[in-house]
């Protein structure tokens, strides 16, 4: 019985995510790597930054869909973001965060334009957002630009939903938290507030007011996201109980 259940869950998981090389993923990976190589040569970045891009390109070669490849841009940008944050190069950092924010806005539009939005695409978004913002806030916290506790809150904002989504996929269930309002709002707030702090520092302006706002708004938005997650996880159980 247990073995049959495991096989059923494996089949469900395979149906949800077809792991195979695909033409779009390979082409997008080559384009990203060429751009990353040109940037690395022009700026003389450490080897680990381009190595990170190679790792993302290998993973991205197995990920289908134009919109998903746009989402992966944020994973590629996690390397440059981490480097700029660790070097306190706030001008390039603010520009890179702005580019990442634009990809977060357009990937859903591309999904609706070229293909039906997928469960996998909805699960990929918070993962790449978490990778990008994690690299950003860790670098800023190491240099003292952000409080360590706030960096941990930002990391936790994405870590718990990602773990919950992975657990649902492993159980063969369709994740319910796909492009939720609280998730979108909290991501926008993190990009705006943390990116704004970087921009203010790049312009040699006082960022203490914006940082103070981030210390209040980001934890509140994170709690709201957690509450939404808890409610969404309870909904399928309640519906199953009613059906039974």
Image (cartoon, helix red, strand yellow):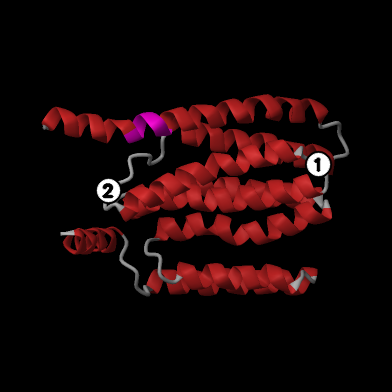
Q: Position of residue 117 (x, y in %)?
A: 33, 49
The residue drawn where x is 37% and y is 61% is 65
Q: Position of residue 61 (x, y in %)?
A: 44, 71
Left or right: 115 as drawn, with respect to 228: left
The part of the chain drawn in magenta is 229-233
Q: Is residue 231 magenta?
A: yes
Rounded to the nearest angstrom, the CA distance separating label 2 from label 1 is 40 Å
The disc at residue 173 is 2
Q: Position of residue 87 (x, y in %)?
A: 82, 56
Number of numbered discs: 2
Q: Depth check: 244 or 231 in front?
A: 244
Q: Depth check: 149 or 16 in front?
A: 149
Q: Earlier in the sequence, mark 2 or mark 1?
A: 1
How packed mark 1 is, by other alpha carbons closer than 10 Å (few <14, some 14-19, many 20 or more), is many
* Quadrant showing the C terminus: top left
Residue that label 1 marks? 145
User: Can residue 113 be seen here?
Assistant: no
Left or right: 57 as drawn, with respect to 3: right
Q: Nearer the viewer, mark 2 or mark 1?
A: 2
* Quadrant showing the N terminus: bottom left
Q: Depth check: 212 or 229 in front?
A: 229
Q: Position of residue 120 (x, y in %)?
A: 36, 54
How packed mark 2 is, by other alpha carbons closer than 10 Å (few <14, some 14-19, many 20 or more), is some
As drawn, the residue found furthest toward the right would be 204
């Amino acid at each position: 019985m247990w073995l049959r259940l495991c096989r059923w869950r494996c089949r469900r998981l395979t149906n949800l995510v077809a792991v195979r090389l695909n033409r779009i993923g390979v082409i997008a990976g080559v384009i990203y790597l060429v751009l990353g190589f040109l940037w690395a040569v022009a700026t003389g970045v450490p080897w680990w930054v381009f190595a990170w891009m190679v790792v993302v390109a290998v993973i991205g070669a197995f990920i289908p869909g134009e919109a998903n490849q746009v989402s992966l841009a944020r994973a590629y940008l996690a390397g440059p973001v981490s480097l700029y944050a660790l070097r306190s190069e706030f001008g390039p950092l603010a520009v890179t965060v702005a580019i990442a924010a634009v990809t977060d806005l357009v990937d859903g539009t591309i999904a609706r334009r070229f293909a039906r939005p997928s469960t996998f695409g909805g699960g990929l978004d918070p993962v790449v957002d978490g990778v990008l913002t994690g690299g950003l806030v860790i670098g800023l916290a190491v240099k003292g630009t952000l409080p360590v506790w706030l960096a941990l809150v930002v990391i936790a904002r994405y870590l718990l939903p990602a773990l919950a989504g992975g657990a649902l996929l492993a159980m063969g269930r369709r994740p319910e938290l796909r492009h939720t309002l609280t998730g979108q709002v909290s991501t926008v707030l993190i990009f705006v507030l943390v990116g704004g702090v970087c921009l203010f520092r790049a312009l040699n302006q006082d960022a203490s007011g914006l940082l103070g706002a981030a210390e209040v708004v980001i934890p509140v938005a994170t709690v709201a996201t957690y509450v939404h997650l808890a409610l969404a996880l309870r909904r399928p159980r309640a519906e199953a109980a009613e059906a039974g």
